[in-house]
Image (cartoon, rainbow, N blue to C red):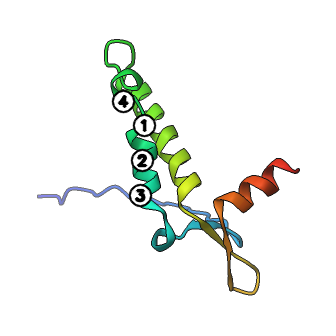
């Protein structure tokens, strides 16, 4: 009796190292304002199942949530020396609009 043959897989993976990445400072977020921001959304109209697919509703929810996170949770960036530099949402808005 022969043993069953097993498939042989080869997986090549290439990951680019990212030097500078913005990271949310979860401990510094203004969650009260984020909650107010989300409370002011008319979710019934925004996520109306009669006019939107589940995929569309997910994209709308994600867009709103990420917008609120960017507005009310500051970010920091890891620079070349390995130290973190804090970036507040207001500073980021000013520097992005001036370019």
Give the residue at the far top of this rendering: 50
Instruction: Determine which of the numbered discs, if any, sits on residue 71 in the image.
Output: none
Q: Choose mark 2 or mark 4, whichever is in front.
A: 2
Q: Mark 2 near mark 1, Cβ–Cβ under 8 Å?
A: yes
Residue at figure coordinates x 53%, y 70% from the top left = 25
Question: Would you name the residue on which mark 1 appears?
Answer: 40
Instruction: Determine which of the numbered discs, if any, sits on residue 36 in the image.
Output: 2
Tell me how far mark 4 sits from mark 3, CA to CA: 18 Å
Residue 63 at x, y = what percent?
A: 52, 39
Q: Mark 2 near mark 3, Cβ–Cβ under 8 Å?
A: yes
Question: Would you name the residue on which mark 4 appears?
Answer: 43
Residue at figure coordinates x 46%, y 41% from the top left = 62
Pick the front one: 80 or 37:
37
Query: Residue 94's quadrant in the figure?
Result: bottom right
Mark 4 lies on a secondary structure that is helix
Query: Residue 7's quadrant in the figure?
Result: bottom left
Tell me how far mark 2 sits from mark 4, CA to CA: 13 Å
Tell me how far mark 1 sits from mark 4, CA to CA: 9 Å
Pick the front one: 41 or 9:
41
Mark 2 lies on a secondary structure that is helix
Mark 3 lies on a secondary structure that is helix
Label 1, residues with CA under 10 Å away: few <14, some 14-19, many ≥20: few
Tell me how far mark 2 sits from mark 1, CA to CA: 6 Å
Residue at figure coordinates x 76%, y 81% from the top left = 80
Give the residue at the far right of this rendering: 99
Instruction: Determine which of the numbered discs, if any, sits on residue 32 in the image.
Output: 3
Residue at figure coordinates x 48%, y 60% from the top left = 10
Pick the front one: 44 or 13:
44
Q: Choose mark 4 or mark 3, whichever is in front.
A: 3
The quarter of the rendered structure image containing the N terminus is: bottom left
């Amino acid at each position: 009796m022969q043993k069953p043959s097993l498939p042989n897989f080869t997986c090549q993976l290439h990951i680019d190292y990212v030097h500078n990445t913005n990271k949310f400072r979860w401990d510094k977020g203004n969650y009260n304002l984020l909650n107010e921001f989300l409370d002011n959304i008319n979710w019934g109209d925004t996520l109306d199942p009669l006019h939107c697919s589940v995929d569309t509703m997910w994209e709308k929810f994600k867009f709103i949530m990420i917008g609120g996170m960017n507005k009310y949770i500051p970010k920091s960036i890891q620079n070349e020396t390995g130290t973190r530099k804090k970036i507040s949402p207001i500073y980021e808005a000013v520097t992005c609009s001036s370019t």
